[in-house]
Image (tube, rainbow, N blue to C red):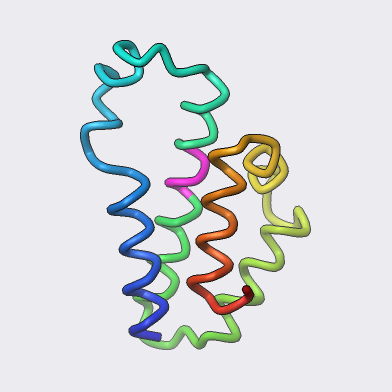
Amino acid sequence: MNLVFERLESIQSMMFPPTLFDGKIERELNLSDEFVDSRVIAFGLVDELLAMVAASRTTHADVVAHWKAIESGTYENEYTKLSKSEFGRVVIYLIESAIHLR
């Protein structure tokens, strides 16, 4: 589980640097609302998976099952929203790679 945690943590630090959340870069680069929304959703999913992996009794199978539930829409429709944007599809690919589904 340490490897999965490290991979998810690296996705978080690479894709979501703290400066992207101050609003200044979004305005300067004139980023679309779709991009900003997908970034917020993606950050939430990565953060949720990180918290789950950090829990002492969580197994790799638990994380995979949780991700598949998210993917199928069992929890929320965030995956569907995320899969519609290019940025979101990149993050989905990275998450699936991190938890060894790709």
Q: Nearer the viewer, residue 86 or 12?
A: 86
Report x, y in % for residue 50.
Answer: 39, 66
Magenta-tinted stretch: 40-44
Report x, y in % for residue 67.
Answer: 62, 66
Report x, y in % for residue 13.
Answer: 28, 53
Report x, y in % for residue 32.
Answer: 51, 17
- 85 relative to 80, above or below: above
Find out whether residue 3 is within the magenta segment: no
The residue shown at (33%, 84%) is 2
Residue 53 as seen in the image, left or right of residue 19: right
Residue 14 as seen in the image, left or right of residue 64: left
- 59 relative to 8, above or below: below
Quadrant of the image containing the C terminus: bottom right
Query: How many dots with numbers?
Result: 0
The residue shown at (25%, 17%) is 24
Question: Image quadrant of residue 28?
Answer: top left
